[in-house]
Image (spheres, helix red, strand yellow):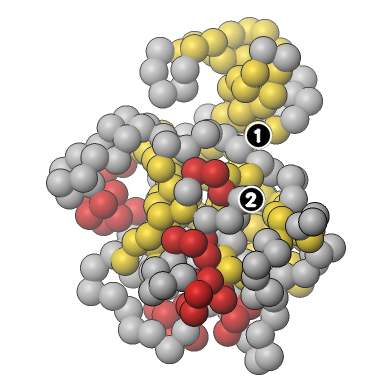
Amino acid sequence: MRYIRHLTPQGPAWATLAPDGDTKAIEGDLFGEHAVTDRHVTPSQILAPIAPTNIIGIGRNYPKHAAEGKKSVPERPMWFVKTTGSLQHPDEPIVLPLSSTKVDYEGELAIVIGRDAKNVSKADAIDYVLGYTIGIDVSARDWQHHLGGGQYNHGKSFDTFCPLGPFLVDPAEVPNPDNLRLTTRVNGEVRQDASTSEMVFDVRTLISFLSNDLTLPAGTVILTGTPEWVGFARSPPVWLQPGDTIQVDIENLGTLSNPVIAASL
């Protein structure tokens, strides 16, 4: 089943999305008691499929991406956080911050945790997944590599730096999240083309590792890392510019698209 979150006069609401495009309202909370109704809805604005409680990013989870940054593959998952304020909705603009001139794209598979998870085994990990969606881990490389005091969080957390969507796909429809084609385009040009089968640490391993003595509350989003051919690795580097459009396609999960604009003074 596919779910969308959309804006109504009463606030955000969920609905199911059928293959023919038909949408039916959901009553209740997708993270708790809920029911699919027979009431058809016409969404006016599609929102990010959830409002995350946490956003965790995984670094260097594709060997070729680690290599293009002249870094080694980590022995265990290397993670950082993006603030929840970095969330952006599908088709809404990524805003280039005034304090950065080196903003980059990263197309990623995103996991949404459906219930509180702590000390989860690999065998049980998928039982904690509410669904999968697409994420763009927008990254200010100057802050990530030079201005951030040795940590990634600042350069990863500017407003609008975490588009998610366009919908949430039930794990039953994604039997193998570790073998999905991922393609990132900027202005229609393919920039990344890989498979999640290339990930160093698979979905089960990431959930189990991150929940080790650490509670992942329901609503946690895990961005599973990006493949090679990000902008900083090109010669010369290619940074996002106002007027660009980023599209990320992941097999079975749809297409997430966001324009890029300059910040206003």
Disc marking residue 160: 2
- Which part of the image, by quadrant, shows the C terminus? bottom right
Residue 252: give x, y in percent of width and height: 57, 47
Residue 218: give x, y in percent of width and height: 36, 32
Please state which amino acid type lies under the numbered disc 1.
Leu
Quadrant position of residue 234? bottom right
Quadrant position of residue 152? bottom left
Q: How far apart are marks 2 and 1 (CA)?
A: 13 Å
Residue 250 visible in rendering:
no
Q: Is residue 60 left or right of residue 22?
A: left
Residue positioned 39% across, 69% down in the render: 151
Residue positioned 66% across, 41% down in the render: 89
Please state which amino acid type lies under the numbered disc 2.
Thr
Q: Is residue 152 left or right of residue 16?
A: left
Disc marking residue 47: 1
Comparing 39 with 224, the one in front is 224
Residue 97: give x, y in percent of width and height: 68, 61
Where 78 falls versus 23 (above or below)?
A: below
Residue positioned 84% across, 63% down in the render: 243
Element type at mark 2: loop
